Amino acid sequence: MNEEIHYECQRCTNCCRWPGFVKVTGAEIGAIARHLGLEEHAFIQHYTRLRPNRDGLALIDKPNGECHFLEGRDCILQAVKPAQCRAFPNAWNFPGWREKCEAVPQLRRAAPPEKNGAD
Ligand code: SF4
Ligand code: SF4
């Protein structure tokens, strides 16, 4: 049986507190705005900023650097949080991430390889 390591989030919230840009796509902006009961335009105006390379929008931070949508140890966007948040640390991470992230490695069955259309 093929197994792979999956890092299970411990909800330490460190990844919501370190400096950086949480990218939001157009579809995510729509979902988050609806979740907050806001018009998309109002959400964009008040809660997003241009990413440094000017190729899209990111969520704003609080003055202390943590994500604006972190309340205590909870993400108030949990049901609609951006893919970038959902994907860390299994789909993307960075050198040294294990020193900051408390996710616990677990062995789990690997997904079967995709069919290549040969049959
Ligand atoms: S949107 Fe939620 S999960 Fe993503 S950084 Fe902000 S508080 Fe954390
Ligand atoms: S830093 Fe790691 S363990 Fe902590 S909330 Fe983020 S993904 Fe989960």
Image: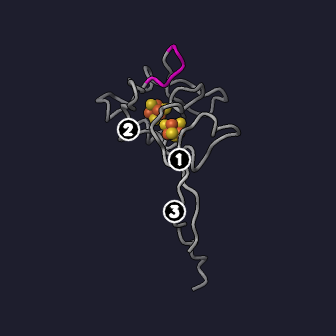
Is tag 2's residue or tag 3's residue first in the polypeptide sequence? Answer: 2
Percent position of residue 79, x then y: 35, 41
Depth-wise, is mark 2 or mark 1 nearer the camera? Answer: 1
Task: Confirm or reject: label 2 Cβ below 8 Å from ligand 1.
Answer: yes
Residue at image location 49% in from the left, 48% down from the top:
8
Where residue 27 sits: x, y (%)? 44, 42
Q: Which residue is mark 3?
A: 108
One can see residue 25 in this view: no
Q: Amino acid at mark 3?
A: Arg
* Numbered range of the magenta stretch: 63-68
* Main secondary-structure element of the magenta-colored stretch: loop
Q: Is residue 52 above or below residue 86?
A: above
Residue visible at 55% across and 66% down? 110
Find the residue positioned furthest to the bottom.
119
Name the image quarter holding residue 96.
Answer: top right
Where residue 70 appears, x then y in whole percent? 42, 26
Element on which disc 1 rests? strand
Screen quadrant of the N terminus: bottom right
Image check: 36 left or right of 117?
Answer: left
Identity, as a three-letter code, of the amino acid under mark 1: Val
Splitting the image into 4 quarters, where does residue 32 fall? top left
- Give the quarter of the image for residue 114: bottom right
Q: Is residue 66 magenta?
A: yes
Q: Are circles 2 and 3 on residues that touch, CB within 8 Å? A: no
Determine which residue is flagged by label 2: 78
Label for residue 104?
Answer: 1
Residue situated furthest top in the rendering: 63
Amino acid type at image mark 2: Gln
Q: What's the CA distance linking mark 3 and mark 1? A: 12 Å
